């Protein structure tokens, strides 16, 4: 079960989708225009969007671009449901960021099955992301979006700084030598050496403000993340 937003301007189709989605146990919100759909997306969270392309105020492709450009919405599945069924239309829709593309007229049972698959994957990913997210006071380390928030303000960490922080915070109290850290955060592309680990730690501490003491130096060995009581 999930929260589904239907962006569709045809009243009969709105009611058909609403009825069948609710029968599946989903919570459904309907928007008749692209602007109303975007308003709903910014007003409340959804797990999936059914998006028509031919809307009265703005093209569904534009709506899809806006959603995919919004970091807070970019992971949400989008299924385009439209009468535009040419191969070029399908390729364009998927290329812009849709997860699936269904042409009208559609078979209701098939559409519901596709929705179940997309929702299941998305909700599994959300649960996995929640398990991997680390919360320390008002600091959030989010490995899915590769960002650190302190009091809801994003910290300007580099990718290496983020990987270093997330790895250490995932293993509190464990001491890692510089070469151990290189093995775990190196990607084979960027140049990171045992000496630059010290520089990354120093820069990371500066950016963490009041949380800088959590990254501890163990003299002669390496670094560890403080075990919180």
Image: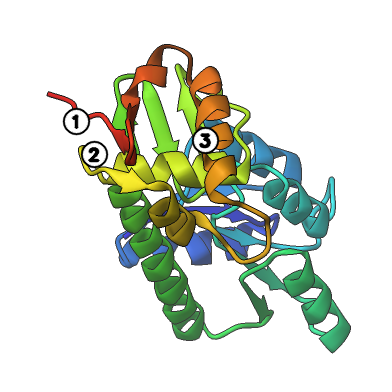
Q: Of the two numbered discs 2 and 1 on the same chain, state the one appearing first in sequence.
A: 2
Q: Which residue is mark 2?
A: 172
SS of the residue under disc 3 = helix
For marks 3 and 2, the one nearer the N-term is 2
Circles 1 and 3, Cβ within 8 Å, touching? The answer is no
| Badge 1 density bin: few <14, some 14–19, many ≥20, Cα 10 Å | few
Residue 118 relative to residue 8: left or right: left
Judging by the rendered image, the residue that carries numbered circle 1 is 227
Disc 1 to disc 3, C-alpha distance: 21 Å
Is disc 2 placed on a helix, strand or loop?
A: loop
Residue 114's disc number: none
Please give the name of the residue rendered at 41% of the width and 11% of the height, measured from the top-left corner. Answer: 210
User: Which residue corresponds to the image point at 58% horizontal and 63% vertical from the top-left?
Assistant: 187
Crowd rating for badge 2 (residues with CA inside 10 Å; few <14, some 14–19, many 20+): some
The answer to whether 124 is drawn above or below residue 222 in the figure is: below
The residue indicated by pointer 3 is: 198
């Amino acid at each position: 079960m999930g929260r589904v937003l239907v962006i569709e301007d045809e009243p009969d189709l709105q009611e058909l989708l609403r009825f069948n989605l609710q029968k599946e146990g989903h919570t459904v919100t309907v928007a008749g225009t692209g602007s109303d759909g975007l308003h709903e997306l910014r007003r409340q969270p959804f797990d999936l969007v059914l998006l028509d392309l031919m809307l009265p105020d703005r093209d569904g492709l534009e709506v899809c671009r806006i959603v995919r450009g919004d970091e807070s919405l970019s992971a949400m599945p989008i299924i385009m449901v439209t009468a535009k069924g040419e191969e070029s239309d399908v390729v364009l829709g998927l290329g812009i960021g849709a997860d699936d593309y269904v042409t009208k007229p559609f078979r209701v049972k098939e559409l519901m099955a596709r929705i179940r698959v997309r929702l299941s994957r998305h909700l599994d990913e959300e649960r996995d992301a929640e398990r991997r997210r680390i919360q320390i006071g008002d600091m959030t380390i989010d490995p899915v979006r590769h960002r650190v928030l302190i009091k809801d303000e994003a910290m300007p960490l580099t990718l290496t700084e983020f990987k270093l922080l997330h790895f250490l915070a995932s293993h509190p109290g464990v001491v890692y030598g510089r070469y151990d850290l290189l093995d775990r955060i190196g990607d084979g592309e960027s140049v990171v050496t045992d000496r630059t680990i010290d520089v990354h730690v120093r820069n990371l501490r500066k950016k963490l403000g009041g949380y800088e003491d959590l990254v501890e130096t163990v003299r002669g060995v390496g670094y560890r993340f403080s075990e919180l009581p």
